[in-house]
Amino acid sequence: MTSPRIYRGLNRREHAGWIMGLTPTQALACVALMVPVLLAVSGGRFADAAILLPVCATIAALVVIPVRGRPAFRWLLHLVLFRVGIATGWSRWQSKVAAGASVDPDEPDLPGVLQRVEFPDGPQFKDVGRVCLIHDTGDGRWGATARLTHSGVGMLSDEQCERLAARLGTLLLSLGHREIVDRVSLLVRTVPDDGTEYEVWRGNHEVRDAPRLARQATDELDRTIGTVSVRHEVFVTVSGSEDRLRKPAVAAGGGVAGRALALYRVLDGLEDPLKALGSRTVEWLDGPGMAEALRTGFNPSARAVLAAAHERGTGHGLEMAAAGPTAAPSPTPRAYTHDGFTTVSYTALMPEAGTVFGSLAPLLAVRTAGERRTLAIHYEVMDTHRAHRAVRGNRFRSGVMTDWKHSKGFSATAMDEREAGGARAQERAVAAGHSVVRFAVAASVTVPSGWNVEDHAARLENDASGRFRLLRLDLAQDSTFVVAVLPVGIGLPRQRGGLL
């Protein structure tokens, strides 16, 4: 029997520091703060230097010392902006419908960072109808989302998991060779169910004259299995930048339709690779489907109502104006409240020792009925030029630091040797035709607002303990909610990223 393959080198930082772990900006700030002190000393003004030294040292500490992933100065800036948003009411939200205002049914009414996202409908896509496009006007990206039917990987053998990992790598490599799409986001959400949806379905499909023994067996299964079973919904979002889409879109006629047709050529070629990853069905969402995905993200209990409407065959789907929450008060520093639910979101940091395929599954292990957990993985595949530049920079930086330590008589640490070896191995892999992938992992837990959300957040942290480090993104819970819960493809900043 072979042991599972361990994937290492997933925790490479973006913009790693050159000088004692400092970025060039931090190093320049420290040098600039030293200048007044040195000038005072050189001029013989020792009293002024004694006053300037603690002041400049305090500012330097704020710039340099990291606190839970962010420098102290950035924490201070974010805290000021957070308090200003609460004081001015910017962070409070109420939908136009709840306020009694007139709305356009096709106009999205969404809070926070989602206000920059537009959801136009594209033209007909094969025989599946119109596809809802996702236009992120802030980052200048166009994308589309599909709902997948997948049985999961919990019951697969190590060999099957290795095959799925290889197919995922092949899919990402193929994206690196395309000229339109460079990002793919995978989102898995558990579906909290109080039994209402199932009761509606059973009431509509129950055979009235069924044998008594069959009814007893069904009721027993409901009691023993139905209360502990957890359903999942899986979404995948693919997107490309406006710069990549512009020329193909102009050739296809321009405008929204031209960009949609350019995306459709990629979507058509992604269905087979997604099915090779174990997806039984791939359903590209139209406008009502996207509205339901957003609505159930904000309000998990809305799923039962929407399912009942679909079961009865009433209505024509949810309108985009009703996709957002009804109300969302100003978020607290450590949680986000929306439509009577509270969500705590994290980013997952990869371990130094590496990880195995499927090791994120415990983050989706629901501990209490009515709790919802989500897991989102965002990938961006660098093109060949950016990949070569990134690995050359990593190899050069590690080599310079190692040579400098040897010249000063310091021996290289085990971490330095591992970093240098990883940089050389990655450069060889890129030279052999592999891609470099930026990625980010986000997880969240959602419970009704009347529950103690900190207890459920602690359980999520316990499930990650020993596998990953969960970093709670305080002061940004409303934005992190979008990254971790909603299938819109938002989740990676516009900068050079962590490398796979």
Image: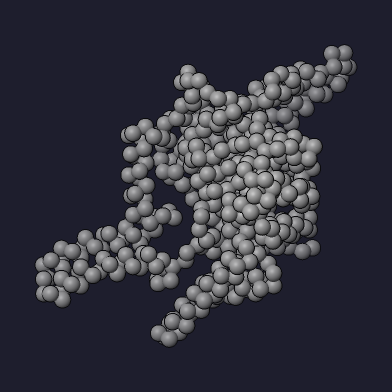
- Name the residue: 46% across, 47% down: 473
**Above or below, comparing residue 280 to residue 339 in the picture:** below
Q: Nearer the viewer, residue 34 or 103?
A: 103
Q: Residue 423 is drawn in which quadrant?
A: bottom right
Q: Nearer the viewer, residue 248 or 13?
A: 248
144 is higher (above) or lower (below) than 53: above
Depth check: give the residue in front, 362 or 36: 36
Evaluate whether residue 104 shows in this view. Answer: yes
* In-image side of 363 versus 277 (left or right): left
Which residue appears at 45% of the width and 30% of the height?
93
Instruction: Look at the image and tell me in which quarter the C terminus lies.
Output: bottom right
Total count of labels: 0
Q: Position of residue 135 (x, y in %)?
A: 58, 42
Please state the horizontal and vertical placement of residue 366, each as a whole percent of the image: 62, 38
Please determine whether, in this image, residue 451 is positioned above or below residue 178: above
Residue that appears at 64% across and 49% down: 250
Q: How far across and how far down the image is residue 348, in percent?
A: 55, 52
Q: Most extreme residue toward the top, as rendered? A: 209
Whether residue 447 is visible to the viewer of this picture, yes or no, is no
Coordinates of residue 168 in the picture (x, y in percent): 71, 56
Please report the residue visible at 32 percent of the width from the left and 57 percent of the height from the top.
Answer: 62
Q: Quadrant of the N terminus?
A: bottom right
Left or right, 29 with reference to 439: left
- Its colouring scheme is one colour
